[in-house]
Image (spheres, rainbow, N blue to C red):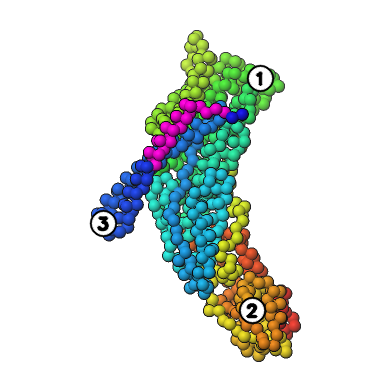
Amino acid sequence: SQQGCDPFAQTQRSKLQHRRARINQQINKEMRMRAGAENLFRATSNHKVKETVALELSYVNSNLQLLKEELEELNSSMDVYQNDSESISVPMIPLGLKETKELDLLVPLKDFICEHYGEEGVLFEKEIKEFMELRQAMRTPSRNEAGLELLMEYYNQLYFLDSRFFPPTKTLGVFFHWYDSLTGVPSHQRALAFEKGSVLFNLAALHTQIGARQDRASLPGLNQAIDAFQKAAGAFNYLKENFSNAPSLDMSAASLTMLVRLMVAQVQECVFEKMTLLRAQNDFLARLQLAQEAARVEDVYSLVHQTMSQPHVKDYVPFSWTTMVQVKSEHFKALSHYFAAIALCDCPAPSDAELLEQEKVFLQFHVTMPEGPSLCVLLQDPEERRKLGKAHLKKAIMKHEEAMRIHGLCKILRKMDILQEVLSFAHKRSLSKYSEIDHEEDFFETGEAPDIHPKTHQKPEIKSPNFSQVKVTDLFHRLGPLSVFSAKNKWYPARRVHLMRGENGFGFTLRGDSPVLIAGVIPGGCAAEAGLKEGDYIISVNGKDCKWSKHAEVVQLLKSTGKEGVDIGVITLQGSECPKAVDRKAAGMSSGSGMLKSNKENNRKSLMNSKSASTLLVWSKKSKRSKKSTYSGVPFTTVGDNEAMY
């Protein structure tokens, strides 16, 4: 049935829309000011002017940050406002995506194709435009699985771009511009690694947004939120381990460590919510377990708060984040004491059969032993249970009040009614329990309750990105197999050789596929006369491109030539004149670039994505083992495996 529209909601929504539009106008104005200031900053060599402009830039950026936070606030209130579930979920922290400037690669790539590959750059315009369209689309991914796949696809495509167009010794000369996700400060680098790292950051950020949007009042929503935050933690962690020297603060090791920990804490909070949802927590042990889960959430949030308070992170992280994390830490500490009190006061004393197990669990429940009678007496005496329960509630109430006090210090959080509501509900619940168990004739001084030992039944996982789940084909595959036709290889200009077939064939042995290699040349044979050399690659036969051709196809083309002979196009790799070249090629399929700490990232990808890599590795083993293809006195009839004489 269609639901009618609430007219009040309509006016609320239009109010939100107006406020949103106003903020967006202000953001655009600040962005224009920023662009002007940036240009001046680059153009001037005057130190004094530079300082003034830098000051203005930081002022504009902090303004932008405030506007973005205000917008984020509106959006989060909007999200809540559209959430159908009855119960209220505590807000989570999502990250904004890094923005980037448009990039025109048409001329640089065409020039490189012409200079390095000796091909007409204009013939590859379609591929270059396709790549640029993919980059354009990746700037605004949708907040769902399709958006994640788009970022993965672009990231995987960058592996090919790197192998084809970024030699180890020089850059393409284009700058990759990205803005810091938290402050909006621009950075640029020529290294493709900066582009890769930024895309990876956005993959993580998109996971955080998907996680924060889930309806956590239902089990499927909770599981999706857990999955999203675990994947976000994995992507931030992967970025930290594989890329270094990033020019922007959001990708510094300190920031990434903080973000990984924040995501882990958000997972742990979801695990706690999952327990409260799954258990009808009325038995003693289940309530103790909830108290320990809450203590665990408090533990991880206080670690995040420490990390956020460190020198390089403190001035950079939004105040609302630091406050939220601190509020959650206090809130969950209060909850751990509340559930401990409920376990003691609302559950009946154990029967003799239950006593042993309860005693065992209770022995490891507190960080330090509570004062007073032995556990056995405590658990069986309702009055002793009430006394300890009361001490736990007293501590819970103190912590609730602390959480509410910190919450009140942050203007942005004060506007978040939901968080306020959750905190005050928990506070009232503890207060009413306290007044319920408080007897007027109590003359004992309520003691200090020991803290609860943190423990979880589901440890958060840091799930690394699985790049192979999105298959991509090399857009520039027409340039030829990557094993040979890559940015790091150099070759002499292609040669056209006219070859006649002699009585004993052409006089060479061939090996491998795509491209086929001339493995040996018989001295005095037709091939030797025509100037073919061992180590040449056949790239065309009678004008037909053979870069990708299989062994059998090339042989077929050669055999079908008549008396008039055959035109063969070959190239020789520079440095392949020495026999070790093939081994060297196999050793490193990919080069590092500016920002990469190591080649871990590239090598893994090269073996995953490039068929030619694996065949190349096979070749290098063969070249060590079978010397039969050379002509140092070994008769040509015994040709090594995978080779044939023609």
Mark 2: few, some, or many residues within 10 Å (few <14, many ≥20)?
A: many
Is residue 186 magenta-colored? no
**Picture coordinates of residue 625, whole percent (x, y):** 68, 74
Which label sits on residue 541? 2
Q: Are the residues tagged 1 and 2 within 8 Å (C-beta)? A: no
**Picture coordinates of residue 526, whole percent (x, y):** 66, 88
Main SS, magenta residues: helix
Distance between the Cα atoms at labels 2 and 3? 63 Å
Of badges 2 and 3, the one in the foreground is 2
Q: Are the residues tagged 1 and 3 within 8 Å (C-beta)? A: no
Q: Earlier in the sequence, mark 1 or mark 3?
A: 3
Q: Quadrant of residue 355?
A: top right
Distance between the Cα atoms at labels 1 and 3? 77 Å
Most distant residue in the top direction:
441
The amino acid at mark 3 is His
Which residue is depicted at the point 58% across and 68% down? Answer: 478
Of badges 1 and 3, the one in the foreground is 3
Going by the image, does 601 lie left or right of 17? right
Distance between the Cα atoms at labels 1 and 2? 89 Å
Q: Earlier in the sequence, mark 1 or mark 2?
A: 1
* Residue numbers of the magenta segment: 3-24
The amino acid at mark 2 is Val
> Looking at the figure, which quarter contains the C terminus?
bottom right
Callout 1: helix, strand or loop? Answer: loop
Which label sits on residue 47? 3
Which label sits on residue 350? 1
**Picture coordinates of residue 217, whole percent (x, y):** 58, 31
Is residue 10 magenta-colored? yes
Tell which of 73 and 27 is nearer to you.
27
